[in-house]
Amino acid sequence: MSGSMLLVTSCSKDDDGDTTAPVVTLNGADEVIILNSGVWTDPGATATDDEDGTVTVISDASTTNPNYNRVNTYTITYSATDAAGNVGTATRSVRVKNEAEAYAGTYSVLDTCNGTEFFAYAQVITVDSTVNNRIKFNKFADYANNDEIYAIMLGDGSLQIPSQTAISIGSGVDPCDIVDHHFESSPSILVVSGFKLNYTDEVTSIGCTGTTTCVAWYAK
């Protein structure tokens, strides 16, 4: 009597030689720019696999990636894994910017508070990383110890220094040479190579008084 045996074998998905990763396709642009403190809805992504068809996409987007309240460039990574363990990815760049960033830079400043004496100095302006439309002067009016004066960009693109006080600025041996100063400005329009700022400089310390109208030309 003769017999025969039928051998049945099977192969798992992991053993079928599938080495092709899913293709992840972004919905929307791969580079996005939004304003600080703005709102943006992530359109997500889709993924297809040559053997599994549509596969699930996950991303590393979170409340801090991107952080809409801090200026920076963020990268969102979208990934999809097929049944064989192959992983496909795609990335999107999201830049959160301060709308007043055009004012940032190093300037040569010509400043006068009486129309006859002119003071030349360098000025560095940086944009605020958490408050949209706000910039910071590294040493406004070139006073010693004066590095906390801020300005805001108005809706028409002009620049204005709100009322604010710098503490114990200046230099010299006279007590009134090292005093508190109060600054504010009227709007000034940004031009291609810089801007002109009209501002008032008021001494506010007790026993030391005086308010001067000044003009400063900022050139990059």
Image (cartoon, helix red, strand yellow):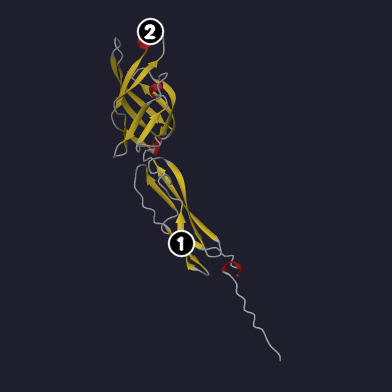
User: Could you say which is closer to the camera, residue 91 or residue 101?
Assistant: 91
Q: Name the residue under label 1.
A: 56
Residue 5 location (% of width, % of height):
66, 84
Q: Earlier in the sequence, mark 2 or mark 1?
A: 1
- Name the one closer to the observer, 48 or 164: 48
Q: Which of 81 and 195 is in front in this view?
A: 81
Disc 2 marks a residue whose amino acid type is: Asp
Vertical position of residue 193 compared to residue 92: above or below: above
Secondary structure of the residue carrying tag 2 is loop
Tag 1, which secondary structure? loop
Which is nearer the eye, 151 or 67?
A: 67
Question: Looking at the figure, which quarter contains the N terminus?
Answer: bottom right
Three-letter amino acid code at the position of disc 1: Thr
Tell me the quarter of the picture where residue 13 sits: bottom right
* Residue shown at the point (40%, 42%) measured from the top left: 97
Residue placed furthest toward the bottom = 1
Q: Position of residue 128 (x, y in %)?
A: 39, 35
Number of residues whose C-alpha sits closer than 10 Å to that of mark 2, classed few (under 14), some (14–19) or many (20 or more)? few
User: Looking at the picture, how far across and down is residue 20, in whole percent?
Assistant: 57, 65
Residue 101, image x and y in percent? 40, 38
What residue did someone put label 2 on?
A: 174
Residue 160 horizontal side relative to residue 48, left or right = left
